[in-house]
Image (cartoon, rainbow, N blue to C red):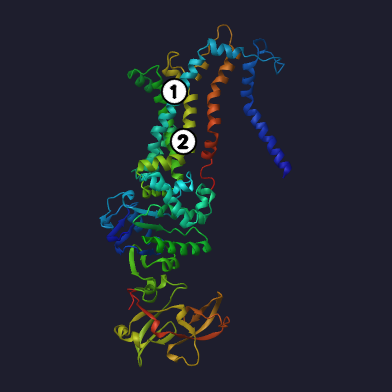
Amino acid sequence: MRRAGLARDALVLVALTAYAAPFFWQLLTSFKPEADLLRLPPLLPARLTLAHYRVVLEQSLMPQALGNSLGVAAATTLLALGAGLPAAYAIARLPVPGRRALLLALVASTAFPQIATVSPLYLLLRALRLRDTWTALVLAHTSFALPLTVWLLAGFIREIPRALEESAAVDGASRAQALRSVLLPLLAPGLASAGLLAFLSSWNEFLFAYTFTASEASRTVPVALALFPGVFEVPWGDIAAASMLASLPPLLIVVALQRALVRGLLAGAVKE
Amino acid sequence: MAQVMMKDLNKKYDEVHAVKDVNLHIRDKEFVVLVGPSGCGKSTTLRMVAGLEEITSGEITIGDRIVNDLPPKDRDIAMVFQNYALYPHMTVYDNMAFGLKMRKFPKPEIQKRVQDAAEILGIQELLKRKPRQLSGGQRQRVAVGRAIVRHPQVFLFDEPLSNLDAKLRVQMRVELKRLHDRLETTAVYVTHDQVEAMTLGDRVVVMKDGWIQQVGEPLDLYSRPANKFVAGFIGSPAMNFIDVSLSDAGGLWAEGQGLRVKVAPAHATRLSAYKGQKVTLGLRPEDLRVASGGDPAEYTIDAVVDVVEPLGSEILLDLRAGQTTLVARVEPAVRAKVHETIKFALVPDRARFFDTKTELAI
């Protein structure tokens, strides 16, 4: 038993190392002095430097891109939750005709390849004069995040016993009040999970962000990273520092939401 | 303080006709229990009174208002749900205060009412806890507390005790009864448990397949069931049914399934119209007792003991008699052995007869 446990732990560790190695390599690179970058050995540099971060923060367009990404991802999350919640509630609770077909269509639409919509979306956004704006990205990202958001939230709402809302109704709450004071607090983990997924999908999205933007006014982090300028050689250290900065916000959000997320991901696993 | 009237109440879902022409007048301060097997329409009826289920046709009146089109919050009712339906993210205090807050009661009044209710139910110590920190019985008390703080016109109970273990259920049953005596509020209570129905109800409404079968005081239902269903549903162990035909041979005799007993003179006139026809004879288990020498032979049945179930205060005997099986409830002093043949005397006046076709009591 003990030995099996040890073996399992070792296996997990190996898998984790393999998984995390590129990340840590990148982390290490971002702190390596320029001279050590392309030399191996040593694996670990003799001294660490913040020079790359200084370059990225002071001389590159990354700060602007980070701001764009945060803005776009936050707006996408809010819009997806704001539009997704009522839809999910209707699907979970109200007698919507053709509910099964609707859910099926929702799931099917998540399988839709993004690349197929790029050209028509581009024409559409250009006609609306939204090219190179946050709005364009927020709309495009939300349209792709919504099906999953609705699907997830509907599932979370279904887990909440109907009797709670009925009880609130008998207690004197209107539908809106029952939603606000009973359903929403219980839905917090679900909102956190669905919101995080929407945020991440927007944060990582490249294709739309690359196609619909023309200048730094709305260029997001993935695009900025891809277009990172190098004059005579690839500035690996700077790119590593920029990628680290790009990973930071999602990481912080996950840490902040950790408790709610665990509850959300485990919802229904344990009988109350 | 209100009566509840249901007039020609119907509920139809797409395929199912769940509640059929229910007419019921629940008086002010009365405790009425709706009882029946699952799917009989009792819960649906209650939920229509609560306003949680739309009424297909008919009319419900609470007090002197027709409430058909009123949302639950405007009906001045309180409901206790089967799974308690406590708000998991609120403390016990907030759970109980929720309804009062929704109705914009001033804070001191809320505090006073919650304290009073907590005292009545013995849960003052629990006010700061969350529902998940409570035992089943405590949750049940909080659910009741949430209902009584509002001083509603009518209490609705939807199988409130069915999630409790047997011992706690008996205890809460007594508490609910005491509570009703104290609060004097009209109550409608739904259960599938006939013992709960009999012990709690001022009157009991037996339902089956959406129809009301009979409305009456508990002991009336027991001694004068309107039909075979009620006779079999109320009472445990259930009434014994024997298919017999009636014949005239020096008085009226019931004969069938290998048994032959005389019909008591008290029943004879009513039954004379059924002479030569098939009827169902109903005998309560306690109306079969071990015969002594003095019992007239025409009211006795010979039966072989199949199973002996000693319950302490009484013994249940599963018997084979003729081609049928019977259950008798006898004194604990009776020493009956399996396979033994025993002569049982029945209480002739208490035998019930049902039309075999319509199943109505004769």
Q: Is residue A195 above or below residue A229?
A: below
Instruction: In the displayed orientation, state which residue is furthest to the top.
Output: A232
Q: Dot 2 surroundings within 10 Å: few (below 14), some, or many (20 or more)?
A: many
Secondary structure beneath disc 1?
Answer: helix
Q: Does residue B352 lie above or below B187 as drawn?
A: below
- Identify the mark at residue A201; answer none if there is no mark: none
* Placement of B297 over or under B118, stated as above or below: below
Q: Residue A72's mark?
A: 1
Subunit ID for the residue under disc 2: A
Q: Position of residue B201 (x, y in %)?
A: 39, 66
Point 42% across, 43% down: residue = A182
Q: Left or right: where does residue B123 sit relative to residue A139?
A: right
Q: Is residue B41 among the parts visible in the rendering? A: no
For the residue pair B51 and B328, the one nearer the viewer reads as B51
**Res A185 → quadrant:** top left
In the depicted view, which residue is nearer to us: B193 or B75? B75
Q: Amino acid at mark 2?
A: Leu
Residue A191 numbered tag: 2
**Which image quadrant: the C terminus of chain B?**
bottom left
Disc count in the image? 2
- Residue drawn 70% across and 35% down? A10
In screen coordinates, is B43 left or right of B175?
left
- Do the residues at pointers 2 and 1 share their chain? yes
Pointers 2 and 1 in contact (C-beta within 8 Å): no
In the rendered structure, which amino acid carries the disc numbered 1? Val
Residue at figure coordinates x 62%, y 27% from the top left: A20
Give residue B99's position: percent from left, percent from top: 39, 48
Q: Earlier in the sequence, mark 2 or mark 1?
A: 1
Question: In the rendered view, would you say B17 is above or below A236?
Answer: below
